[in-house]
Amino acid sequence: MHKTYIKLLSTLTIIILLIFISACVKGSNPKVLRIGVSGQMPPYSYYDEKNNKLVGFDIDIANE
């Protein structure tokens, strides 16, 4: 039981540190929100070859 708590605490600590490190990247603009999509899940996000850009529901929500 004690080992389980230590593993859980270690995992949570690592996650929190990674969040802080990613938020403090040098040169990043704090007013820019970056969103990652795969572009392979229509209708949520997919690549439109006619316009050469990503389109879909996720893209529309991100732009709003």
Image: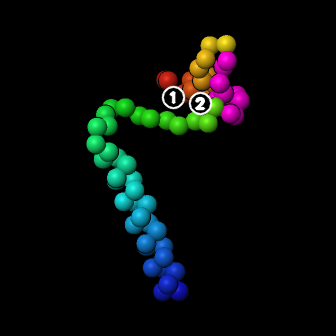
Residue farthest along the right direction in this orientation:
42
* Secondary structure state at the residue bearing disc 2: helix
Q: Is residue 6 left or right of residue 58?
A: left
Residue farthest along the bottom direction in this orientation:
2
Residue 58 circle label: 2
Residue 50 showing in the rendered view: yes
Position of residue 3 measured from the top left corner of the image (x, y, whole percent): 49, 84
Q: Nearer the viewer, residue 1 or 37?
A: 37
Which residue matches tag 1?
62
Q: CA distance from mark 2 to mark 1?
A: 6 Å
* Secondary structure state at the residue bearing disc 1: helix
Position of residue 55 measured from the top left corner of the image (x, y, whole percent): 62, 22
Q: Are marks 2 and 1 in contact (CB under 8 Å)?
A: yes
Please report the residue visible at 32 percent of the width from the left and 45 percent of the height from the top. Answer: 25
Position of residue 42 measured from the top left corner of the image (x, y, whole percent): 71, 29
Q: In the displayed structure, would residue 37 be above or below residue 17?
A: above
Residue 52 circle label: none
Position of residue 14 measured from the top left corner of the image (x, y, whole percent): 41, 64
Residue 30 showing in the rendered view: no
Main secondary-structure element of the magenta-colored stretch: strand
Please report the residue visible at 47 percent of the width from the left and 79 percent of the height from the top. Answer: 5
Query: What amino acid type should be assigned to the residue bearing mark 1?
Result: Ala
Please report the residue visible at 58 percent of the width from the left and 36 percent of the height from the top. Answer: 37
Look at the image and say whether residue 44 sits in the magenta stretch: yes
Query: What amino acid type should be assigned to the residue bearing mark 2?
Result: Asp
Residue farthest along the top direction in this orientation:
50
Q: Residues within 10 Å of mark 2 (few under 14, many from 20)?
A: some
Q: In the displayed structure, would residue 22 be above or below residue 43?
A: below
